[in-house]
Amino acid sequence: MKRDTFHRVWVAALAAALAAGCPDDMPPSPGSGGPESMRILSLTPNVTEILFAMGLGDRVVGRSNYCTVPPEALKVPAVGDTLSINLEKVISLKPTLALVVTKRPEIATTLEGLGIPTVRLKCDTMPELMETIQAIGRETHTGEASATLSAWIRESLEAVRRRVQGRTRPKVLVAFPMTVGSAQMMVAGRGTFIDELIGVAGGENAYPAVAEWPTVTPAKVIAMAPDVVIINAVGGDAAPDRVQAIQRAWQQWATVPAVRKARVHVLTAPFLTIPGPRVGMAAECLADLIHPDAARQEDTTRSAEP
Amino acid sequence: MKTRPLTVRRYVLGIFGWAAVWLAVSAVAVVLGAENIWAWTSPGDVRTVLTLRLYLVLTAGAVGAALALSGLALQALLRNPLADPYVLGVSGGASLGVIVASLWLTTIAAPLFGFVGALGTVGLVYAIAQRRGRLEPYTLLLSGVILNAFYGAAIMLVTALVSPERRGDIAYWMMGSISTFDPRWSLVAVVGVLAVAVAVLFACLAKGFNLVAVGEDTAGALGVPVERLRRVTFVAASLVTGASVALAGPIGFVGLICPHVLRMVLGPDHRRLVPATVFFGASLLVVADLATRLLEGVGGQTPPVGVLTAMAGVPFFIYLLRTRWRRKTEIR
């Protein structure tokens, strides 16, 4: 049910951005040197998502194996992942612009070495996401679409902020299950993207230090005493039996306030940790769990439509 | 096996013959690949892809030659048919050195640390396995096994300490792969030059290898400075192994397969084996790399070449264990 709603919202966003992104000259005039002749290689899921949301989906000629959102992206040929890219395929696609968000600088230098103009993007925090969207708008000469998308994202985050305004901030721990049964998990440290979303959704990160997805033991979790625990189970972990196993595993730690108050939630939405167009939805999801009594303002997303 | 006596003419012809095999294999490996570039219209794109493939072919050639030479020398000097830089933990030691260097120092230091790791391991294996100046074959292999286990644990420790993104990188690198990512032509040149230099050195030492393979006492009695030969060989083998691991990660079993296949064809004379090993090792890894690229074209994902060589090498190891080992014919 929930996922259905998300999808509808996404499509609405896409439609809105599409409408804004391609104003008058809908039939592209080939060879005019503008965005029409642009051939974009996008090697990161969130950038691909942003491109589609900005109405540039038909300019994307190559994607990474992980770029599976929106479903239309699956029609674009995949060229590999961050560990191994089929460079021959990349060359055959004749990209005129490569958008790379990566902590491996060699990818950008390799693409540049092949004569492909490459833009390095940083997209780990909310301000960086906004900058990325702006940069994509600049590089693809679609400043208007990028401004629309940024405004929409800002507005959707603002709606969540308004919803939880003035409420006490419970301590929230957002974690990735490592393996079920293993005693360790990865949690969102301060300064991560999820940390910002927790703030927007009216919570306070239970993990006290600035860190990038540190691995913690149950003892540490008990010491942090989170009021709400949100486990993001994606991929193989999202299977119903895995979700149940994760829930069961948490029941052992009854001293954790979140366990006592039955506030351990397993969230299977795959977009929670993706700094892309759906951050507003991610914040909304978190707010639902952190402040279940704060009613969603209906039509927040629709009101943001231009 | 009956072989005709080795003359200078046959020696030179042999070198050219094996070089021709390598060149032919390399040419095929440049022509074929993941994409059918011969149907492309843009000559610029074709040229770019050909350059990429040339890089792969040269890298595979240099690494293959280096590992095969290293295997040949270790088998001769340790008098053990199952010696191979991968099996004895030499590649493992080099890997640990390379990982440590590239994580906490600069990548330029990686080949040097690889060399230190490799040389340290050869020294350790040798020290553990020798008793009263004799090498015990079982102890030799077991010390390789146990050092591999130690390096495996140390690399896992490093992996656990670094960031999640780096974890993926290390895991993939440990599989051994030849990649066009971040082409390092200079390192390829270094490994290539080292392989050629070590091949020339081993060619000069080939007579000594032959005598040591028969028996250390015999060799000593015939005036071969066994200890010095061993030291020079170990350093040279570690040098090429360390540099090739820095370039392509630990690729296993090339050093085991090549010398044995060639012994089956050419007999036990190292004067013939050394030049043949250089080109055959190079050709074998070029073919293995080509296979991974063709699989990429079919399946969309590249299997690391080290996985391929290990899958081919393990059955070969078992075969050697069941045949050569039983007959105690050493490396004949």
Image (cartoon, coloured by chain):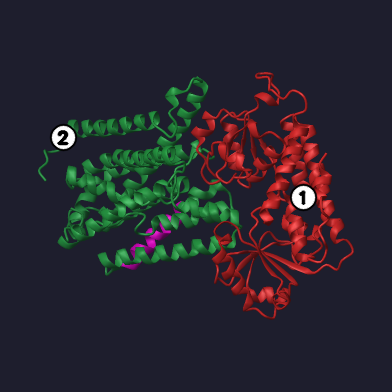
Q: Observer-nearest residue: B259 or B134?
A: B259
The answer to whether one can see residue B136 in this image is no
State how far apart marks 2 and 1 are (Cα): 74 Å
Q: Observer-nearest residue: A262 or A30?
A: A262
Please state the chain letter of the residue tagged with numbered disc 1 in the rendered image: A
Q: In the image, is B61 to the left or to the right of A301?
A: left
Of marks 2 and 1, the one in the foreground = 1
Q: Magenta: predominant secondary structure element?
A: helix
Q: Observer-nearest residue: B296 or A12?
A: A12
Residue A38's place in the image compared with A204, above or below, is above
Q: Which chain shows up in green? A: B
Please state the chain letter of the residue tagged with numbered disc 2 in the rendered image: B
What residue range appears in magenta? B115-129
Q: Residue at x 55, y 68 (%)?
A: A180
Q: Residue furthest front?
A: A1
Q: Position of residue A123 (x, y in %)?
A: 71, 47
Q: Amino acid at mark 2?
A: Thr
Indicate the quadrant where residue A28 lies.
top right
Q: Which chain shows up in red? A: A
Residue A258: image tag: none
